[in-house]
Image: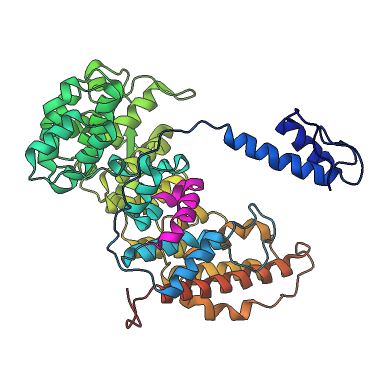
Amino acid sequence: MSSAPTPGRAPAWEELVTAALLGTARRTPPGCAPGPDAPLALLDAAAEETVRRRAGLRPARAAHRPEPAPEDTRPPLPPAAARRLAMLLAGRPGASGGGRRGTAPDLMELLPQWLATANARGYAAPPEALPALLDAARGRTDLRPAALAFAGPRALWLARLNPDWRFALRTTPGGGTTLPRREETDRVRRLWREGLFAERVALLCELRARDPDAARELLVSTWATERAEDRLMFLDSLRTGLTSRDEPFLEQALADRSRNVRATAAELLSALPESALAARMAARAGACVALDHTHSTPAIGVEAPHECDAAMERDGVMPKPPAGRGERSWWFGQLVEAAPLGMWSRGLGGRTPREIVALPVTDGWQGELHAAWCRAAVRQRDAAWARALLGEPTAPEAGGPGAVSLAERAKLLGTLAAGERAEWVAGFIATHGLSEAFQLLGVCAVPWSPPLGRAVVDALNIARDAGSYPWSFSGVMGLAERCLDPCEASRLDGLLAVPDEPEDASPGAGGYWAEAFQRLVTTLRLRAAMTDELRPAGKPGGV
């Protein structure tokens, strides 16, 4: 028989918890005698206190039962793919930085590719996987668009019930609200006038994708009464389907009271080579740049503007330069960036973009002029100028004749078709190696084309045989795990052995390279298996 608590005393729950944590040998439970029966007395007192605590709760008003979760009519995942998803969601990211990661694939890094394939094939997420999927998307913003598309309408239903998943409502346009159809004119106008900001943005973006003119007219109808920050967001939606029919509205926006709105309107107009703003910028830029015949060979002379007048400011030229930048070069760069690239062939003797870029530029203005042309080529999506500024990938100067940084080169590559982009980067790697190629590889389509994949593997193999410091290539190796075509796995079998280390090699480099290639091969074969598991039954190949 255990010792009962002293009658008339109700020990506080906190005192019982303290006794349990410290042990009855160190702390006797309140109202109990010390000794061997103290643990049983503690349990009896805790049971009694539990009943007392529960009985003392005030009944609350019953909550409304939530509506049933919506149906997801998409086909379910094949069983093997569902098991794979559970494994990927249970995986943990590998070690970050340049340390050794072993030979096991990083499962969480494969989740984005798995989601992209599952979405492309139209599968529905298993209901039991939704909590883990939402938790993964909560921790990684890059996963959210693909994860929420795969999770479907049930993710939004869950997000309304769990505050930890409310990001799904913010991420989804309109917070999951069903938008009216275009033909429902009254509902469209009512939502535009009375809806929440996220709903209005979603409505405008969706309408712009289907009917650009109708979206613009909707925006015009309330433009004068919108807040400045809202006008800026709405104006940005016009990038989709931008045409010359938007020019009158954008010209009016150049007089907006918000500087940011004016700058965005000017940027959009400069992307229309036939616009009046583009013509004004062409006149200003043309007055600053001309052929200089005073040298033995033709050259480009530059005379930067001496002031930024009110008309230039109205057309989007920012008058105040950033710290460390001269005013005249700042104004000059903005003028050239906004001028249509087609004007330069006419103004510089009918030369092609490649011939123009090859001309010397006097008085140290070449870097400023070429950098502005780079920005113009990206803005106007001009592949001919991008090729000219990139130059040949095998050129001795790694930056090409016009690009001023890796970031500029990456943006210029983005204007080229996927095949041409991959071919240029492959040539660059073959000539210059991988030390500067990481950012360029990031703009190439996945999976990498065979020539690009071979160039990367060959460069890694060369670095391995040379005994190069291996951890400096961990970023490229990780990128190869996600982007190399799985068909390349068989070509890598010969690289799995630990190589002989040259005398000047980094200590332990051979073991690292063997581990890294083993992980690469294992990951490629796992990606191939993932793709097969997501293939519909009866379809041995293709999507």
Q: Main secondary structure of the magenta part?
A: helix
**What colour scheme does the image use?**
rainbow
Up-down relation of residue 519 to residue 417 (above or below): below
Image quadrant where one finds the C terminus: bottom left
Q: Is residue 130 above or below residue 328?
A: below
Residue 249: say if magenta.
Answer: no
* Left or right: 174, with 82 as reference point: left
Query: Which residue lies at the image location 18% right of the left edge and 40% below the top edge?
Result: 272
Residue placed at 68% from the left, 62% from the top?
Answer: 468
Q: Is residue 348 left or right of residue 147?
A: left
The structure residue drawn at horizontal position 77% and vertical position 31%, both measured from the top left corner, is 7
Magenta region includes residue 134: yes
In the drawing, does residue 445 fall left or right of residue 497? Answer: left
Apparent side of residue 303 relative to residue 142 in the rendered image (left or right): left
**In this view, which residue lies farthest toward the right?**
35
In front of the other: 420 or 142: 142
Q: Is residue 484 visible?
A: no
| Closer-to-camera residue (447/68) | 68
Q: Position of residue 30 (x, y in %)?
A: 81, 32
| Residue 49 visible at all | yes
- Residue 536 location in percent, x, y? 34, 76
Count of picture labels: 0
x, y percent for residue 172: 33, 44
The image shows residue 324, relative to residue 182, as above or below, that is: above
Closer to the camera in the image, 280 or 76: 76
Q: Magenta stretch?
A: 125-145
Instruction: Give x and y (percent) for residue 515.
Output: 67, 69
